[in-house]
Amino acid sequence: MTVRPASQIVPVAQRTALILRELARIVVGKDETLKLALACMIARGHLLIEDIPGVGKSTLAQALASVLGLKYARIQFTSDLLPADVLGVSIYDERTQAFRFHAGPIFHAVVLADEINRAPPKSQSALLEAMEERQVSIDGQTRKLPEPFFVIATQNPVEQIGAYPLPESQLDRFLMALELGYPDAAAERELLAGGDRRAKIAELAPLTDAATLVDWQREAAALHVAPALLDYVQALLAASRGHASGAGTADTGARRGLSPRAGLMLLNAARAWAIVGGRPMVLPEDVQAVFPAVAGHRLAGGARAGALAAQSLLRAVPLP
């Protein structure tokens, strides 16, 4: 694989910088989180945000769709949600004497699965094929989802009443898991003085479109990764398995090791982070920047515990 010329990468970095600046007007004081969310989309991944209600999870999803010029749908996950409410349903049309398919909200470019762990596992699993295969099978027919396709799921902490923990198989479908957290004092003061930020989303002008985003995804996938960096990623994977089994020398808090697929996702995320930063190849710093978000929910339960486990692994594995 050849190194892409820097002249082809910098324009992407300039445009993504504008996008992040617009998003920062809506989601205040969370610049790193916004950059990770955008990198997640460029890496063709899906995003899980775990936090308490009221910190801006849904606002982030809606603002991201608006500034990228993508069609957006929100699915409120509740205890009575059915898979058909997500995927769609075929209804008999008396005029045509045939069944007609009515597409569900999953057929949008950006889908917000709000409070996903409020719904029972059967409804949660309706997202699995869509997220992994980017298609759904209904009534024996396979239907393609739009490109790009991006799921942002929010979940409340599992200790809250009425929450169903997500199974590991579904957690693995998410490229990244983030925690927004409370804003700092300055950001909170800006929020209080500026009023409801969700009302300002309508003022956002699209700064790109679906076709351009797909081009960025292709450019990111072609970014060069040096063999030494592959060695570093492999060392992180091996260390996670050793610590999860108790064979490591340091306590990272990891309960399970990272799979080979997690390693591939880590590289995809690092490539996207590099292209947002205007770099023509992936550096170790790019891997380190995305590692907690990519690995945390695969190492331990909960966004905060997982991020701590990932940081411990980064400290335990030397740079190449």
Image (tube, grey):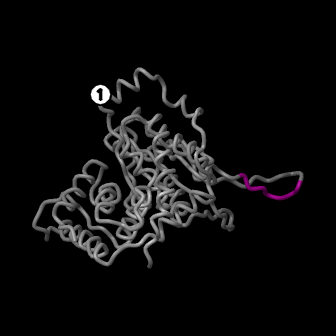
Residue 266: x and y in percent read 36, 65
Q: Is residue 100 visible?
A: yes
User: Residue 106 at x, y = what percent?
Assistant: 60, 53
Q: Number of marks in the image? A: 1
Is 71 magenta? The answer is no
Crowding near the residue tagged with mark 1, few <14, some 14–19, many ≥20 C-alpha atoms within 10 Å? few
Q: Say which quarter of the image contains residue 118.
A: top left
- For the residue pair 79 and 312, the one nearer the viewer reads as 312
Question: Which residue is at the far top?
Answer: 193
> Looking at this view, is 202 or 123 the one in front?
202
The residue positioned 46% from the left and 44% from the top of the image is 20
Q: Nearer the viewer, residue 249 or 192?
A: 192
Numbered disc 1: secondary structure: helix
| Residue found at the very far right of the displayed protein | 95
* Residue 117 placement (x, y as % from top left): 43, 47
Q: Position of residue 37 (x, y in %)?
A: 43, 50
Q: Which residue is mark 1?
A: 185
Residue at position x 63%, y 65% from top? 137
- Compared with 23, 149 (above or below) is below
Q: Is residue 75 above or below residue 318?
A: above
Viewer can see residue 170: no
For the residue marked with disc 1, what is the amino acid? Ala
Q: Nearer the viewer, residue 15 or 106?
A: 15
Q: Give the left or right position of residue 11, taking residue 33 as reference.
A: right
* Residue 52 higher or lower than 92, as above or below: above
Among all residues in the image, which is located at the extreme front?
A: 7
| Residue extent of the magenta highlight | 96-102
Q: What is the magenta segment's predominant secondary structure?
A: strand
Quarter of the N terminus within the rendering: bottom left
Could you tell me which quadrant the C terminus lies in? Answer: bottom left
